[in-house]
């Protein structure tokens, strides 16, 4: 009987990424070193952190003048007021600002802690911001890789988010290119002829979570390659995954 | 350079599961048919639906007498009052009951739509409930498979949940056995010597999402095998993933 198999491979030996780096070139280099061949329908998952660095989405905290609001909240919760200031600037709307946690809707529409502003895996005193437009970033890297390898690809820019109700973080898709971020079973029949009503799977998020299994946090594997998954091709965007405030029961 | 690779395989030709079925025996049969060998550290992901069926967590809607509350809400939202009644009985607490959606905390502590009560992939007029104790179910199937194959295994019982803020559903872990559901990077150093503060990854959820890539909804693949992932062994439980109401900012 035929067995369906999907595999995810962490690209080894990825170099430190600097401002202005050409990520597609670095990925191609890593692919060649690893002896892997790139094929049609391969999916690349790229950690947001290196996209932000390459695009110069990096701030020095020493340059930040915190507002009175940021100073007050930082003092009350033992935080760095400059970091709080950056988070507030990146936010369109604050959902929760309590118990030392800042859960916000970012200017792009992501709901997450600290607006995705991150102090890890970057030199001390600096922070990374999310890419300005993760879908555009994904499309750019994908197009460059498609040219490089002559293959039809999909690409996901991923980040690590918490969620309500469940402990622990999972990777999700910020930017998507070359695929529909959803597989839609609505209207299809299940094995009993019953209609599947509300089953729209967020496959781009699931692919991001799959990639995290080989990325880890401390291992320096910011790019993964997923193959064997027959995703729905098309010009989908990561921003389609964002539920609007009007449709959301928890905002 | 060494390449890390994780693969996920959908077990083919899985039979329809009846009440009282021995899932470990069915999984072993499917493994043998597929020609796969089971090794130490393999992870099985089993869809909640077949666990519920095997354990007899199935109700006939014709047997349900809906309460006045269930009748009223069902009428207002075009729902089946008997189904609403079952959902309310399975719930400890209702978080949202609006726009035709019922988001509840189940008796077990899961926060999800419709308390996990499901009308798909079961004969018309019947519904499945979640397993009574998904961790116990996971442990039982895992122990049986370990005996059968003489290998150290982990096992996850998975289900498909929605989430706030993001469209689409993803698979999560309900029950876990043989592994810690988290990988904890707190206190470790990142590549720059900075401490990783809040990075506890919910790997069991990510493994459930990975498995969904080969399960689909309509394809009749209720069991997947993940290999190559060096998970933290131990007697973790799926219920550890449930954030308590007291710690939750969105309940």
Image (cartoon, coloured by chain):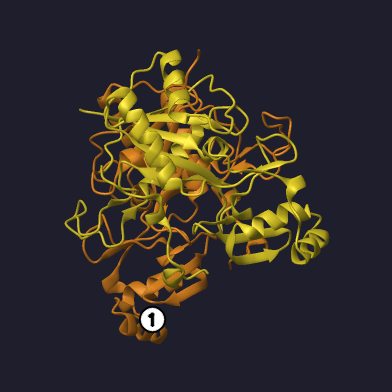
Chain colours: A orange, B yellow
- Frontmost residue, A72 versus B162: B162
Q: Give the left or right position of residue A239, taking residue A51 as reference.
A: right
Q: Looking at the rendering, which quadrant does residue B152 occupy?
A: top left
Percent across and percent down for residue B244 are 43, 66
Percent across and percent down for residue A251 are 58, 68
Residue at x-position 52% and y-position 31%: B222
Percent across and percent down for residue B158 are 48, 42
Considering the numbered disc 1 on the image, is that residue within a helix, a strand or a loop?
Answer: helix
Q: Is residue A64 visible?
A: no
Total numbered circles: 1
Q: Looking at the rendering, which quadrant does residue A237 occupy?
A: top right
In this rendering, the answer to whether B113 lies above or below B8 is below
Q: Is residue B16 visible?
A: yes
Residue at x-position 41% and y-position 61%: A116
- Specify the farthest residue to the left: B193
In this rendering, the answer to whether B141 lies above or below A39 is below
Residue at x-position 61% and y-position 66%: B94
Residue at x-position 68% and y-position 65%: B97
> Callout 1: few (<14), some (14-19), or many (20+) C-alpha neighbours within 10 Å?
many
- Frontmost residue, A56 versus B130: B130
In this rendering, the answer to whether A190 lies above or below A99 is above
In this rendering, the answer to whether B80 lies above or below A43 is below
Percent across and percent down for residue A47 are 37, 46
Question: Which image quarter holds the N terminus of chain B?
Answer: top left
Tell me which chain the residue with mark 1 is part of: A
**Residue that mark 1 sits on:** A70
- Frontmost residue, B102 versus A175: B102
């Amino acid at each position: 009987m035929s067995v369906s198999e999907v595999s995810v491979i962490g690209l080894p030996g990825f170099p430190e990424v600097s401002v202005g780096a050409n990520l597609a070139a670095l990925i191609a280099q890593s692919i060649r070193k690893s002896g892997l061949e790139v094929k049609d329908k391969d999916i690349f998952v790229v950690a947001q952190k290196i996209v932000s660095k390459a695009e110069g989405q990096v701030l020095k905290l020493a340059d930040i003048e915190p507002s009175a609001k940021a100073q007050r909240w930082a003092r009350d919760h033992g935080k760095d007021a400059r970091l709080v200031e950056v988070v507030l600037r990146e936010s369109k709307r604050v959902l929760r600002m309590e118990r030392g946690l800042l859960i916000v809707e970012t200017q792009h529409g992501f709901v997450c802690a600290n607006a995705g502003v991150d102090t890890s895996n970057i030199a001390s005193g600096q922070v990374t911001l999310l890419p300005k437009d993760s879908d555009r970033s994904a499309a750019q890297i994908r197009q460059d890789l498609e040219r490089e390898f002559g293959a039809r690809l999909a690409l996901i820019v991923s980040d690590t988010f918490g969620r309500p109700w469940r402990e622990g973080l999972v990777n999700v898709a910020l930017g998507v290119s070359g695929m529909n971020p959803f597989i839609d079973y609505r209207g299809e029949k299940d094995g009993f002829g019953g209609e599947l009503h509300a089953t729209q799977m967020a496959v781009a998020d699931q692919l991001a979570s799959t990639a995290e299994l080989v990325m880890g946090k401390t291992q320096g594997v910011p790019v993964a390659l997923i193959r064997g998954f027959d995703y729905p091709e098309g010009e989908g965007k990561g921003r389609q995954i964002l539920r609007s405030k009007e449709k959301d029961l928890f905002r």
